[in-house]
Image: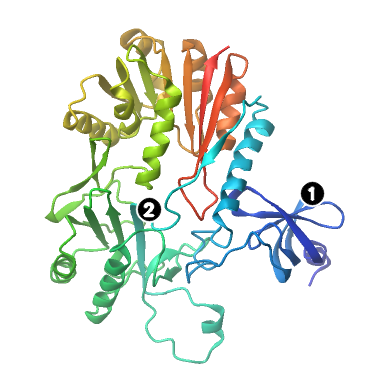
Amino acid sequence: MSRRNKARKQVFENVEVLDAAAKGKTIAKAPDGKVIFLPNAVPGDVVDVQTFKKRKAYFEGKATVFHKLSDKRTEPACEHFGTCGGCKWQNMGYEHQLFYKQKEVTNNLTRIGHIELPEVTPILGSAKQYFYRNKMEFSFSDRRWLTQEEVQSDEDLGDRNALGFHIPGMWDKILDLNKCHLQADPSNAIRNAVKQFAIENNLEFFNTRNQTGLLRTMMIRTSTTGEIMVLVQFFKEDKPKRELLLDFIAETFPEITSLQYVINGKANDTIYDQEVICYKGTDHIFEEMEGLKFKINAKSFYQTNSEQAYELYKITRHFAGLTGNELVYDLYTGTGTIAQFVAKQAKKVVGVESVPDAITAAKENAQLNNINNVEFFVGDMKHVFNNDFIKTHGHPDVIITDPPRDGMHKDVVQQILNIAPNRVVYVSCNSATQARDLALMDADYKVIKTQAVDMFPQTFHVENVVLLEKR
């Protein structure tokens, strides 16, 4: 080993893990006071650490020996924990997950945003800690991920087909799933039956490197109304084999209300530029919330935890403090879910979104729900949301904004400051970029309320809602 590698790779013994960091990592400290980021420990563990990266201010490493296990630990429910990479916090008790999520949001707002916070409303945990997702996407592969034990064994590994998730950082390796704890039944039953049937009938699983095979991906969507959508993505058209599989799915799971497929021969497996073909049933399912119906098709974006999305929207509506006289702008409106959810308490809601299909769905849903005081417009927020737009559609009393992870473009923040509505409700799935945007608004707006919401138990992700009022 070179000297450079020796300097970079060190072992620290009996180190206490002190805290949780961003992206599911935890923090310990080296003897010289440098921070060590670990992917596989829980705060309170006492461990030996093998470092594999050295930076100016910190190390990255891995816990190799556990001398003492934290009292914050719990037994992971899933047999795939540790390999899958999806639910990084399954080994931490749920009350501790909530504590660290709350702490991250508060730290980001105060340290990045330098925001003076009111008394922080405690984080809202999810009633369901497992089986809460309404959408899952699984990939087929003829080269399933092998464990270290399998690689080292001399036994014939037999069938290498897999239907499951990408191994983190490995674009061509798929972990074969037995039971996933994220989506309720019949999700596991459908996936396992499809895999078994495909193997028995010699339907070729996809090979990403060689771009060969027939079966590419499978998406399962469920809704609180009891409807189920299954979409199978094929790499090429093979009518007899395609119909064989789709007929099997339809007959074995008659509860599926929407069975669809895509033929996608592109290098990547995104379906957004592909034609989705309905094989049986309808080309959509419905989600329902307070009597409002939302039509969801294969390409629709909808919050993946339906029950907790309802709680998030209720907090957003409560923060908006509507009396029925307000003109509300809903920025990054998506399929208009929040816009329609607050419409009955507003005079009018104007939604803006850059994805044309989402706006088509928003208009359709508004019609379906007989909501006449909403209008939706397509366009890139930093271009559309200008002075002419305000002149045409009116000066908003309240702005609700729910941007993607990157937060708002600085021009959009500036435009909100120019418009100067009385209240802004900022919904965020990334409190770091939210904090950056709030810092830009701090001279004009005071943070009145902040409430974190846990949409994704067992993961490090957390949403946060902030109410701003004009100073």
In this figure, which residue is indicated by the disc labeled 1? 56
Q: What residue is drawn where x is 74% and y is 66%? A: 47
Q: Nearer the viewer, residue 290 or 63?
A: 290
- Check residue 133 in the rendering and tell me which mark sits there, or answer none: 2
Q: Nearer the viewer, residue 268 or 218?
A: 218
* 352, above or below 98, in the image: above
Q: Residues within 10 Å of mark 1 (few under 14, many from 20)?
A: few
Q: What residue is drawn where x is 40% and y is 43%? A: 308
Left or right of 67? Residue 128 is: left
Q: In which quarter of the view is residue 350 placed?
A: top left
Secondary-structure class at tag 1: loop
Secondary-structure class at tag 2: loop
The amino acid beneath tag 2 is Arg
- Check residue 392 in the rendering and tell me which mark sits there, or answer none: none
Q: Position of residue 458 (x, y in %)?
A: 51, 56
Marked residue nearer the N-terminal end (1 or 2) = 1
Residue that lies at the very extreme toward the top in this rendered image: 391
The amino acid beneath tag 1 is Lys
- Residue 269, can we see it? no
Q: Position of residue 238 (x, y in %)?
A: 17, 68
